[in-house]
Image (cartoon, helix red, strand yellow):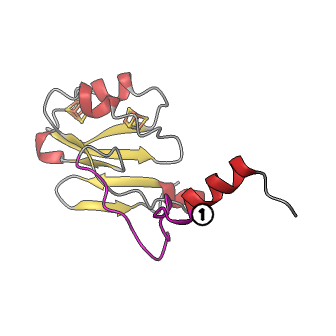
Amino acid sequence: MRIPGKMASEVLRHSVKTPATCNYPHEKQEMPDKFRGKIIFKSENCIGCKICVRDCPSEAIEIVKVAEKVFDAVFHLDRCLYCGQCVESCPKGALETSVEYELAQIDKDKLRIVFHAKTGDKPTEEP
Ligand code: SF4
Ligand code: SF4
């Protein structure tokens, strides 16, 4: 097959360039600090105002009172857009974005994450 001149120069140019893609998942890339991955809940800062719930465009957050001034957060990662609006809206810095992006699941129930107050992040077994 005859390669036209313009195409030949493109082929040559790209044959000496470094690849634009990485060999994922064998090679993982470091995400920038401001990457909007999985949201982290810092229960010690939460005052239960639910501004995050109100501002979330996809109804992906629930704030549950578990004791006087103590709140759990439930995140529905299957609905989350990773827009970061909840982090912007929280007046107490109780929400943060993380660089965690490997969130794919076969079982949809595992995308419902409960941040229990002061005990960290544990998937719940409740529907
Ligand atoms: S906006 Fe912040 S302080 Fe208010 S309920 Fe949400 S996480 Fe808690
Ligand atoms: S990142 Fe966006 S979609 Fe996800 S919980 Fe926060 S506000 Fe909702």
113 left or right, relative to 49: right
Residue 42 locus on image (x, y percent): 18, 47
The magenta-colored residue range is: 15-33
The residue tagged 1 is 107
Most frequent secondary structure within the magenta stretch = loop
Residue 46 locus on image (x, y percent): 17, 38
7 over 53 or under it: above or below: below
**Looking at the picture, which amino acid does disc 1 mark?**
Asp
Which residue ends up furthest to the bottom in the rendered image? 26
Mark 1: which secondary structure? loop
Q: What's the residue at 34%, 44% (across, down)?
A: 36
Residue 2 belongs to magenta span: no
Front residue of 91 and 17: 17
16 over 33 or under it: above or below: below
29 over 95 or under it: above or below: below
Task: Characterize the local packing of mark 1: few (<14), some (14-19) or many (20 or more) Cα atoms within 10 angstroms.
Answer: few
Q: What's the residue at 23%, 43% (across, down)?
A: 96
Quadrant where the N terminus sits is: bottom right
Q: What's the residue at 72%, 51% (across, down)?
A: 5
Front residue of 76 and 83: 83
Which residue ends up furthest to the front in the rendered image? 5
50 left or right, relative to 123: left
Front residue of 87 and 75: 87
Residue 3 locus on image (x, y percent): 79, 57
Q: Is mark 1 within 8 Å of ligand 2?
A: no
Q: Quadrant of ligand 1?
A: top left
47 left or right, relative to 127: left
Front residue of 109 and 36: 36
